[in-house]
Amino acid sequence: MSDTKMASNGTENAEFSFTSNNNASTSASTGRKGLPKIQTQKKTNDVCHDDSTPPVKAQTIDELHSLQKKRSTPTTPITGTQSAFFTTLSEEERQKQQLQSISASLASLTRETGPKVVKGDPARKSEGQKVTLTSHSHHFTPTISVSDSSLKFTHFLYNLSPAELYEQAIKYEKGSFITSNGALATLSGAKTGRSPRDKRVVKDKTTEEELWWGKGSPNIEMDEQTFLVNRERAVDYLNSLEKVFVNDQFLNWDLEHRIKVRIVSARAYHSLFMHNMCIRPTPEELEDFGTPDFTIYNAGQFPCNRYTHYMTSSTSIDINLARREMVILGTQYAGEMKKGLFSVMHYLMPKRGILSLHSGCNVGKDGDVALFFGLSGTGKTTLSTDHNRYLIGDDEHCWSENGVSNIEGGCYAKCIDLSREKEPDIWNAIKFGTVLENVVFDEHTREVDYVDKSVTENTRAAYPIEYIPNAKIPCVGPHPKNVILLACDAFGVLPPVSKLNLAQTMYHFISGYTALVAGTEDGIKEPTATFSACFGAAFIMLHPTRYAAMLAEKMQKHRATGWLVNTGWSGGSYGFGSRIKLAYTRIIIDAIHSGNLLKANYKKTEVFGFEIPIEIEGVPSEILDPVNTWLDKMAYKNTLSKLAGLFKKNFEVFTNYKIGKDKLTEEILAAGPVF
């Protein structure tokens, strides 16, 4: 008994030791049942390795958990001086303004007030609920004073970090998994690509005059009333949910011309996607964010009403430029948000005298900027990603009086057949924080199989641009020196590289040509010409010649050179010739960047009237003129005439449209093929 008391009542500096029981004569040193006896000795010195600390201040487990976290805001890396000055507000006032703004965004047009919004995950019961009601009425419409929706809270999860969005997706969204490389794999539902036939734009007095309508245009009209019906459907769906995700972000790295956007969505996957694709605000910028310039309501899980006027399916992507709003119903494909905002920029930027471009862009160490235009399969991503140059962006840009700037804060890369050897930068960018859409992975190891097309061939990865090692942050650069138009010519008649004059650059920019290889039932494959105005017809808002005129003006002012580079076939059409080696194309691109290609000797081709170099160091001279590579010269001439005819036919839709000076239109027409 005395031993027990000694063990329990020892002082703080007590030293514990064990004495072995080697024989019976030492029984006095043993305790009961022959076990070593605990002996204590008082010491004046501190205990060695004492790592004891005062107990935590928390009184409950929830309080303990709250100490684990500190508040922060996800940001995009920014270097350089910020041009904005921020108003100093109290934390309470900032929260009040934020709640009012989000409540206003979520307001229904048939009720007098917005929803009762409260920040935070409803699963966390300990969080307080600060509610702000705001009136929000744009139109004279019947109001319903009381409804069930006014009896509930709408929780909003605001600008969550990737880690938080991972937790939300994995916990609440079926089909969300962490892959072996750390990326979030998820599914976009039945739609695994854009639905261009379901995209609508409100046609009003302003847009009727300004936008491109009719044959060849991507803009399918709808009226204001139909938009409001779909908006109401989307907002009601979002307000019926227990929680929604809200992203407040920017478009355009040019601080003078950036746009504030708000994305309201129902899925963590959509929120993480836009977190990656848009420019992430700094904490200071977020405090001063205020009212957005444009708002997206993504209610993609909920279909539109097919009996609504103008609807042709259960999917509808609607843009109202007057209201600065976009509504998504019936599709969960995240690319609709990205390209919808790009369409909006194609409208807003030209009104400021800024050219919006569907292009890749990089810059050399000496500040020489190059733009890369090209449709799918032309090598735009591959050639604009260059380890010897800095990447400004891979897809969407603006060209203003300040130079070029990336519209986005991330990249949206195709993943099908992705390999470390072919695309090392994209491969390495797929890590924690990246969204992988519709990929297939091993059930046990979670390793992604990029070749597997079980879900779709259009597998994608969305990641912040800073995941690319040679990305230029901020994503801005000087005025371009070279404008490179890429075409994968499966007909095999275009030269590997041609220097274009200004009129030719406009003609081929408006045409937006490449050739695809289409399979037939009997196994014969033939090239199929594809034309997409401005190399992005699905996203432009104004007539293509409007963008071409702006491009010509800027190229002329800043002395940029136009080039047409064929990354397709030589020595015959697909099935007979061979594809131009990527190594040769890279040498050509390097010669353009360095300025050496401008010093070469040139000759003019027939039909298209291209200026082609006679010699490029490192490239076989015989392939520079495609006629040299064809054994059957008559077949070459016939194929060349066939392609020229396709160009002529495609350009007919633009022939009667006047831009700038009348003479300019004539020059563009004269720049086309002559045969």
Image: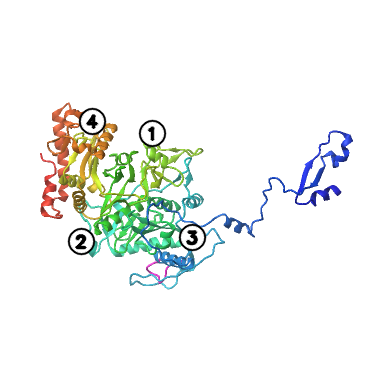
Looking at marks 4 and 1 on the same chain, the residue that comes earlier in the sequence is marked by: 1
Q: Position of residue 202 (x, y in %)?
A: 28, 61
Q: Secondary structure at mark 1?
A: loop
For label 1, the crowd category at 10 Å Cα-Cα, with few meaning under 14, some 14 to 19 and many 20 or more, is few
Task: Write down the quadrant of residue 97 in the picture.
Answer: bottom left
Task: Tell us which disc is closer to us: 1 or 3.
Answer: 1
Q: Position of residue 530 (x, y in %)?
A: 23, 42
Question: Is 3 drawn above or below residue 624 in the view shown?
Answer: below
Q: Secondary structure at mark 2?
A: helix
The residue at which mark 3 appears reads as 242
Looking at marks 1 and 3 on the same chain, the residue that comes earlier in the sequence is marked by: 3
The colour scheme of the drawn protein is: rainbow
What is the span of residues highlighted in magenta in the rendered image?
107-116
Task: Tell us which disc is closer to us: 4 or 2.
Answer: 4
Looking at marks 4 and 2 on the same chain, the residue that comes earlier in the sequence is marked by: 2
**Mark number displayed over residue 421:** 1
The residue at which mark 4 appears reads as 617
Q: Position of residue 447 (x, y in %)?
A: 47, 38
For label 4, the crowd category at 10 Å Cα-Cα, with few meaning under 14, some 14 to 19 and many 20 or more, is few
Q: Residue furthest front?
A: 44
**Quick one: 103 or 556, which is closer to the camera?**
556
The residue at which mark 2 appears reads as 209
Question: Is 650 drawn above or below residue 61 in the view shown?
Answer: above
- Horizontally, residue 73 falls left or right of residue 457, namely right
For label 3, the crowd category at 10 Å Cα-Cα, with few meaning under 14, some 14 to 19 and many 20 or more, is some
User: Can residue 517 be seen by looking at this rendering?
Assistant: no
**Quick one: 247 or 645, which is closer to the camera?**
247
